[in-house]
Image (cartoon, rainbow, N blue to C red):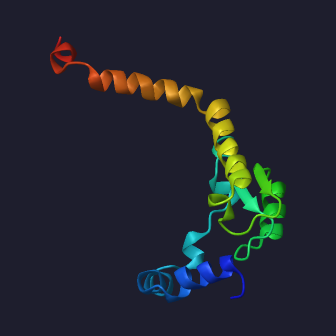
Amino acid sequence: PLRPGQLMIHFFASTELYILHTMRRHFWWWEQILWAEECPSTRTRVVLGSKDQLVPVDAVRAYLAHKRVPVTWLDGCRHAQFLAHRTYFRAAVHTCADLYETVLPATRQAFAVAAAAADAPADAAAR
């Protein structure tokens, strides 16, 4: 590891005792795969960084485009760098906000009705 990001990944993924144990003993790639067919496209957004060191982003992007799954492409972003980079973070948040505003209003309304019903006094429900 030569760069700060590589040092962080090296430390957290290969030297920290508990993460190392979990990754080596309990993390199997074939159990972590999420295929596009398993994701409802109206509720799925994928954010990819173009310079990710762990994920083959070009292949993933092509696969998702073929399956018509929306992708937000963060040009120049490395693996998880959006967490520490304001521009990338905003793009990821806007992706989620757009999903929330365009796809989930009915879900928000249903949740509000359910929350109001849960707050209603118990004796009112008995009547």
**In the rendering, at what x and y percent does residue 37 appear?**
68, 55
Image location of residue 69, percent across then percent down: 75, 51
10 w.r.t. 94: above or below: below
Q: Residue at x 82, y 64 (%)?
A: 76
Relative placement, left or right, of 62 versus 118 is right
| Image position, residue 81 (x, y; %) | 68, 64
In the displayed structure, 68 sits above or below 103; it is: below
Q: Quadrant of residue 52?
A: bottom right
Which residue does the image show at 84% across and 57% down from the upper left?
66
* Residue 79 vs residue 113, the one in the foreground: 79
Q: How many marks?
A: 0
Res 11 → quadrant? bottom right
Residue in the foreground of this view, choosing between 74 and 127: 74
Q: Position of residue 61 (x, y in %)?
A: 81, 62
Where the C terminus falls, by quadrant?
top left
For this rendering, which residue is in front, 108 or 89? 89
Viewport quadrant of the N terminus: bottom right
In the rendered structure, the answer to whether residue 93 lies left or right of residue 106 reads right
Which residue occupies 51% across, 79% down?
A: 27
